[in-house]
Image (cartoon, rainbow, N blue to C red):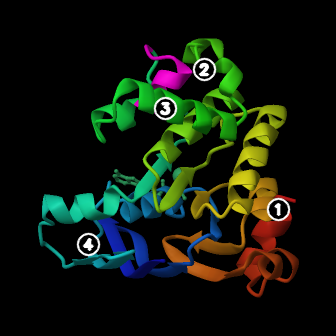
Amino acid sequence: MIELSHISKSFGETLVLDDVSMVVAEGSVTALVGPSGGGKSTLLRCINLLEIPDSGTIRMGDALVTLHPGQKLRWDAIQSVRRQTGMVFQNFQLFPHRTALENVMEGLMTVLRWPREKAAAHGRELLAKVDMEHKADAWPATLSGGQQQRVAIARALAMSPRVLLCDEPTSALDPELAAEVVDVLGKLAREGTTMIIATHDLRLASSVSHDVLFLEAGKVMEAGPAERIFRTPEHERTRRFVSSIT
Ligand code: ADP
Ligand code: MG
């Protein structure tokens, strides 16, 4: 289980996250939605401590990190959270000089110190999970955006994260290629992969997520089961937002 309590974050004078709390049950998928600039990416980056919140607490499994204004976090505290997360970015960010399989093997070999053979075998299993086994030896530049994103998802899964954090995973893709990525994320969701997905893609949010959190100007405007939020949003802002993207 992942629990964020009262997370706030400012950049200079600008309050970007304002007392955000959320709970993500193991095996569930939460979509972060809301207008651009609302704080979705910053929230994802706070969850894996790529950004350090100014205040609040983050509980991830056994790791508990409490932030106080002005306090410097210890590196081992940061690592105790970060190693439980995997990140998928809008622009894939594969290593260009490594094949698809080598991209997936990289962390297993350099971080976990697995021998090459074992890393390759597991890497192929992960590529199969995202329907990319047939492109194991391809260079990223020769793959479509949808294929690159699927390799990036396999790479993020390689470290067996407690939660997969996805920042606009389909936003750089044409609809057809986005659909491949939605299919893969849907399959992972059915297998019980815990995910938090920031997205503008209503099809992704509505087909894959169990819970939705609507963020605007750094505040949680509305949160709850996806079905309810998409069918009968309570707040006028959420209603307008949901109808504007359907
Ligand atoms: P979203 O992902 O919902 O579009 P972001 O989290 O990217 O929103 O941004 C929220 C706000 O924080 C925006 O006003 C953005 O300009 C600001 N912001 C994000 N990152 C930084 C940063 N590193 N420095 C200063 N401002 C930032
Ligand atoms: Mg963003």
**Residue 105: horizontal and vertical position, in percent?**
44, 30
- Which stretch did the figure color magenta? 97-105
Membership of 151 in magenta stretch? no
- Determine the residue positioned at 61% across, 70% down: 27
Which of label 4 and label 1 is nearer to you? 4
Q: Is residue 243 left or right of residue 83?
A: right
| Ligand 1 placement by image quarter | bottom left
> In percent of the image, x 77 and y 79: which residue is there?
229
Amino acid type at circle 1 is Ser
Looking at the picture, how far across and down is residue 36, in whole percent? 59, 56
Can you tell me whether the CB of the residue at mark 2 lies under 8 Å from the nearest atom of ligand 2? no
Circle 4 residue: 54
Query: Which picture quadrant has residue 214?
Result: bottom right
Q: Amino acid at mark 4?
A: Asp
Label 3's element?
Answer: helix
Residue placed under numbered mark 2 in the picture: 136
Alpha-carbon span between mark 4 and mark 3: 34 Å
Residue labelled with disc 3? 104
The residue positioned 69% from the left and 42% from the top of the image is 170
Front-lying residue, 193 or 228: 193
| Other residues around mark 3 within 10 Å, as few (<14) / some (14–19) / many (≥20) | many
From what the image shows, is residue 96 above or below residue 50? Answer: above
Q: Amino acid at mark 3?
A: Val
Residue pointed to by mark 1: 244
Taking the image as drawn, is residue 60 in sight? yes
Q: Quadrant of residue 100?
A: top right
Give the SS element for disc 1. helix
Disc nearest the viewer among 1 and 3: 3
Q: Of the two numbered discs 1 and 3 on the same chain, state the one appearing first in sequence.
A: 3
